[in-house]
Image (spheres, rainbow, N blue to C red):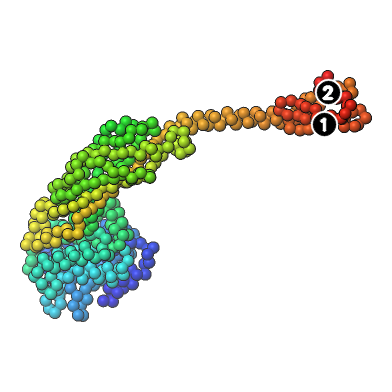
Amino acid sequence: MRRALACAVLLAAAGPACASAQVFLVQNSGWMEPFYTDPASPFKPLVAALVGAATAPGDLLVLAAFNQSQPGAPSPRALLSVRAGAATREQVGAALAPLALARKGGALADTDLGEAVGAAITSAMGGKPGLVWLVTNNRNSPNNDQATARRNREFYELIHQGGAITKALAFALRMPVQGAHYHANGLMVYAFAIGEQGARELDALLASGRIAQVITEPPARLKPLDRDTVRLVPFRVANAPGVAFSMAQNGMLRADVDAQARSPAAQVAWRLENTIYPYTIASAVLSARSRVGAEDRPIALASGVVRALAPGQSMPLASTMQLPVGQLPGAWSAKAIASAGSAYVLPGVIELHLSGQRLALSQAFRQRMQALFPGDPLPDIFTPPAQVAASDARLPLEVRVNYGVAPLVALIGVGLVVAGALGAGALAFARPRKALVTVEDELRTLHARAGTTQPIFDKAGNRVAQLKTTLFGHQLIDLREGAQVRLGR
């Protein structure tokens, strides 16, 4: 118990801004006998490889063995509590090496999957986000209860009704082992994401491919079953001159629109793919919308019904999609000129809604489970909850317009002409101008800049007028009565 509490202290002290936290629960009850006693068992090396692949340097990890808690014999029991690093795999291997089947009261210990997961979430992780991994043979039988179907159903309800678990996956692995008392064909590895941050971490971990290097089987999704059940992939666009669709590596759909295109709609042919392994979408009603910029438009679908779509399979889906050309700036607008040489982007999303959704466990998965866990009623617990009758899928969308540099070049040219004219005007304004003024039959030559006014004096030194100079010439002002002053000779 002290070691289990030490794990809780380690994770609680990490704080919300610390590295990811992961708990790995390894079953060592009596039902696991062949995995521990078969000399050729790959069980422990698999666990060490899994921990090494799932954790990154700096992650907080807890490795614990579990069975069923009894007075004086708590479960789970911590085996290792460290930060992940270069030697993680070796540390896990060393901690697992002495691990043996647990005995309680002389008999081999029983199993309580729900107790182990609950303890990991509340005690070891202290309610903080992260990942919980459970390695088990799926024999969930507290107090040697033989009603494994009911016990598995309770475990499944814990997954679906537990608010802390935001995402749950199950990897069914083939691992034939022979012990003195039991024979087993397979092993199950569960991954539970705790909190929304945990779900993002699990998605990123799967996308990195590190888990696939250890476990090559695809994960079966247990939760959520109400979103991202399908994927849209465009493969043909018609009736939209100047519009091209493509898929980015991050899964975003891009619509590249020519700056002159003004077609009101595009005929898009999609492939609708079932991404919710291991479930077949027995039936569902489809509807779709596009939300781009300030526009929210329905997408007209040629067929609004999905039937018997197996996991990993796709069906054609034709649609008419309105393009937000009214929101695209004109070629001479400030936005277009600012985007010259690059793309002006309108972000958006395509939303697909499946209502009246009925999911059924695929026959291929049922057969695989029966082969891995013969006689185990486990496949029945994969029955989707009754409340999962709808799901949503979102496809990020970018509408991109590439504006040429011609308007920008023209604008620069106009600016240069205007600047030149202003410069010439400034030079003309600043250049002194010569003026001939006759005062009492005496011809004088004066120099004055545009915008200035200077006095004119007679021979006796009296001011008799002023010379005003503009861009357009000279003018005598404030003439003294009787003064003999004139412009020119």
**Looking at the picture, which amino acid does disc 2 mark?**
Arg
Residue 360 placement (x, y as % from top left):
13, 54
Task: Please tell me which residue is depicted at 22% across the width and 76% down the height of the picture.
Answer: 74
**Looking at the picture, which amino acid does disc 1 mark?**
Asp
Crowd around label 1: few <14 · some 14–19 · many ≥20 (10 Å):
few
Q: Secondary structure at mark 2?
A: strand
User: Observer-nearest residue: 435 or 413?
Assistant: 435
Task: Please tell me which residue is depicted at 12% across the width and 78% down the height of the picture.
Answer: 106
User: Observer-nearest residue: 255 or 366?
Assistant: 255
Q: Which residue is mark 1?
A: 478
Residue 118 placement (x, y as % from top left):
24, 69
Task: Please tell me which residue is depicted at 11% across the width and 76% down the height of the picture.
Answer: 107
The quadrant where residue 315 appears: top left
Residue 270 placement (x, y as % from top left):
23, 40
CA gap, disc 2 and disc 1: 12 Å
* Mark 2 / mark 1, whichever is N-terminal: 1
Q: Which residue is mark 2?
A: 486
The quadrant where residue 293 appears: top left
Tell me the number on the disc at residue 191.
Answer: none
